[in-house]
Image: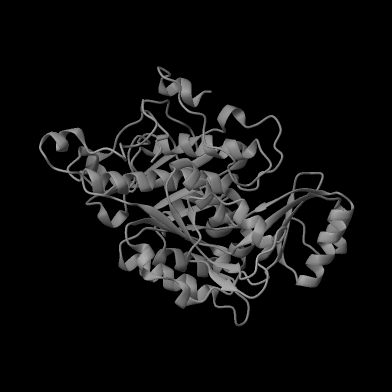
Amino acid sequence: MRFPGRRKHKHYFPVHERDPLLHRAGVSAPETKIHVVGIDQTLVDIDARVPEELLARYELPRGGSTIIGSERAAQLYDELFEKKQISYEFAGGTVGNALHNYSLLSDDASILLGVMSDVIRVGTSGYRYISNTSSRVNLDHLQPVDGPIGRCFALVTPDGERTFAISSGKMNDLRPESIPANVFENAAALVISAYLMRGGPGEPMPEATLRAVSLAKERGVPVVLTLGTRFIIADRPEFWRSFISENVDVLAMNEEEAEALTGFADPLLACERALDWADLVLCTSGPTGLYLAGYTEDSVKRATRYPLLPGAIPEFNRYEFSRPMLQKRCDKAVKVFAHIAPYHGGPERITSANGAGDAALAALLHDMSANRYHRARVPTSAKHVREFLTYSSMSQVCRYANRVSYEVLIQSSPRLTRGLPEREEGLNDEAYWAM
């Protein structure tokens, strides 16, 4: 499993060799396989640069996310293709993006649950989805369907605003019985999105999602929810607050979704409010950077060595060197916050911000799975005096998430096309993260 932070070696831990101390004592370290499970609407992202008038003609609310029928989707695609307005077509879906990035970063397995066209031909959406997904993402459990998967049009107007038009196809036809219980054994996390709970009449996706959440909770697997878009949250904020409180451990969102959920426009205050419902909160905030908020045990909190930051909560990053925990695992829980500004101030030119938040989430998932892996391999390590959620401090997770997000912002694809640059021998931590 690759390691993103302050280590001389390429991997978190020696995955092909026994621990040298255990080897000397004639004892083998336990065989451990850790993975991340995710449920997603399998779809292909179609990014296009369009004039404002196109949105009006297709009755698409600017900046919104609208479900459109197959006929209108075909008409829209034909127009974009004929006018050469399509920038790219890639496999998409917020959870699918996160799992692909996670497997690329960690060089380890993840399992995707969803649907896939039973018949796949070259050039179809199903073909593009599979060909753009990391081979480390296990697709063996996808449910076959008779029809196409989804298509998501990301229509970018000259001012940079993104408007989404989604043709669902069969992407919401995942049945509860297609969620196998055994995939949650040794899972580091279950990742779901708010989109999954917005099924239409007769669509089984919400029920399948709730079954997966139930199976994960029964096995002590953290449930991670990414909010998707502000319109879904603003439509039913009370529902989502209740859903998060009852089912979710880790929450990922951007500043607009955060405001729709909490009522606070300030990302820091929104993160603090979200801690009433979740145990760990990741909030990306565009040019402001990203925030991480969580709980830790008072007796093991660690003060930062960096300058204390001003904000709606004065000196909020005081204990950012702490590692987060589930609130229920703390004897005396304290709230801790971390923040980082955009890497290198952000790219000089952003082709598309689509997928940047998913990339940040993938970094967090990587660190969570590394913690689970190390705890299984070396349970007596001082790293596990408490049941922490991550292997690294909140400050280091922010730096990692920020770096991975930057890699997506400098390309067209919403998914990583390569891992982070390898650390050169002798390069210290500060120099590596400043590259």
**Is residue 7 depicted above or below 46 in this figure?**
above
Q: How many marks?
A: 0
Mark yes or no: residue 267 visible: no
**Is residue 32 depicted above or below 77 in this figure?**
above
Q: Where does the N terminus fall, quadrant-wise?
A: top left
**Which residue reaches farthest top?**
426
Q: Position of residue 4 (x, y in %)?
A: 42, 34
> Which residue is at 23% across, 39% downward?
18
Q: Position of residue 278 (x, y in %)?
A: 41, 57
Q: Position of residue 291 (x, y in %)?
A: 49, 42
Taking the image as shown, residue 279 lies to the left or right of residue 258, namely left
Q: Quadrant of residue 236?
A: bottom right
**Is residue 75 depicted above or below 381 in this figure?**
below
Q: Quadrant of residue 70?
A: bottom right
**Which residue reaches farthest bottom?**
202
> Which residue is at 40% across, 17% downward?
426
**Is residue 295 depicted above or below 219 in this figure?**
above
Q: Nearer the viewer, residue 273 or 227?
A: 227
Q: What coloring was used for the rendering?
A: one colour
> Which residue is at 69% across, 61% downward?
125
Mark yes or no: residue 164 visible: yes
Q: Nearer the viewer, residue 146 or 74?
A: 146
Q: Nearer the viewer, residue 409 or 126?
A: 126
Taking the image as shown, residue 49 lies to the left or right of residue 392, namely right
Q: Position of residue 413 (x, y in %)?
A: 66, 45
